[in-house]
Amino acid sequence: MYIGLDLGTSGLKGILIGEDQTVLAEATAPLTVSRPHEGWSEQAPSDWITAAETVLDALAARGLGAVRGIGLSGHMHGATILDAADEVLRPCILWNDTRSHAEAAELDGDPMFRRITGNIVFPGFTAPKLVWVRRHEPRVWEKVAKVLLPKDYLRLWLTGEHVGEMSDAAGTSWLDTGRRDWSDDLLAATGLSRAQMPRLVEGSQVSGTLRDALADRWGLPKGVVVAGGGGDNAASGVGVGVVRAGEAFVSLGTSGVLFAANDGYQPDPATAVHTFCHALPDTWHQMGVILAATDALNWYARLVGTDAARLTAELGDLQPPGKTIFLPYLGGERTPLNSASVRGAFVGLEHATDRQAATRAVLEGVTYAIRDSRDALAATGTRLEHLLAVGGGSRSDYWLKLLATALDCPVQLPVAGDFGGAFGAARLGLMAATGAGAEIATLPQIARTINPDPSLKDAFDAGHARFRAAQSAIKDLT
């Protein structure tokens, strides 16, 4: 058996799979986010340990005596700061925290960062957060002995080892993404050194072994290996089998991700595309990331006093876009705008805009934002022939038809199953324990393919053009 642990922002999920990758058990534990000031987003790392204990307690009811490997996945970019005794110095600053926007802009103004990392320095990334701590929390700064990403703090608890891996490290602004190693120059530019970073392994490699006390507690054998694992999206890529060039998925979750695997390193920071290492050796991936996908639909559902599933169920067949346009920038945007300050808007509201028309506008706005990411990936040379759809939004047939038509790209829906970060982490645990490679990260069985509606292609092309015009108009107003 193999365990995958996926540390999400709102909860920790654990999954237990067998040798044939059949899911044998799963469990979740909730987590909350603290927002002490506007733009701040924090979690207590001790809560992650409590959640992991809850999940492992539940999985242990299935019996864990046959477990050979554990893999880890987690939300990226979080600054988990430890002193020399491995005590946490302050709450972890999360991926969606924007307090360090000024520091990010300063670092991004140094051409060395884009040249070495292949990426813009976004406010959510780890390096600008440490510069913020240096400026605003000097007493914390002077005690910094190690900086870990969130899932790697779980690893420290599991193994006693300070270890990270390439896919998560690529989101720090300290990694030489082409060479797959820390950059001493970038670390020095932020007042840090390699000694304060974890050592790096590939996601499918062994990072350490489970501590005996934890093995005894949950009935695991001695010597269970813990894989390097992956950042949440890279682990999801492994889970859904998007590990080879030409394969891609779209995730309609809280945020929206357009993810494509690459067998070479092809950065283009100006597009605001994320170019990161994949969780497997000699493989990279590109992502367009939008910060509000189902989050935008859930926001609108709360506004009108219902739930998202009911809103999308009301829509019937795919319709051409109306005059109402929705810009889904509820908390800033990454690809392609790279703006922490831009905010959303309804544009073109009229007497005819009823609840269904506004629902369609919300779905269209998120879809157009994903199309912007598709165009940004295309600017780097990445072409998408088809897309696997995952995440909660993929339960809406209307949204899938809209996505296929607006992107002019067939969308494939996997059969029911778990293809998220926890499943990918379990696959990485299997690889680390057995020496298997990318060949076990197979694509899921496809339940059906949703093809573009050619009769509506021109209408959605025009709708996207109006969306871009509205985007330009509001960008500096908010």
Image (spheres, rainbow, N blue to C red):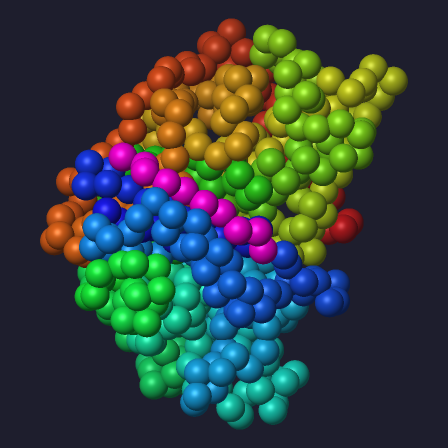
Whole-percent x and y of residue 222? 21, 65
Name the quadrant containing residue 117. bottom left
Give the image location of residue 81, x and y in percent.
Answer: 50, 78
Which of the two residues, 43 or 251, is positioned nearer the viewer here?
43
Where 22 falls versus 413 (above or below)?
A: below
| Residue 470 picture quarter | top right
Q: Vertical placement of 133 versus 293: above or below?
A: below
Assess whether residue 414 is covered by the magenta stretch.
Answer: no
133 above or below 467? below
Q: Residue at x 68, y 14 (%)?
A: 314
Residue 443, horizontal then vertical, whole percent: 26, 31
**Residue visible at 43% across and 29% down in the picture:** 389
Residue beneath the point at 13% across and 48% down: 436
* Residue drawn at 50 percent across, 21 percent down: 400
**Is residue 462 or residue 171 the one in the foreground?**
171
445 relative to 132 in the view: left or right: left
Is residue 177 shown above or below 136?
A: above
Query: Which residues fall within the magenta stretch?
Result: 22-31
Comparing 101 with 354, the one in front is: 354
**Is residue 48 found left or right of 354 in the rendered image?**
left
Quadrant of the rendered structure where residue 467 is? Answer: top right
The dominant secondary structure in magenta is: strand
Q: Left or right: where does residue 162 sit relative to residue 315?
A: left
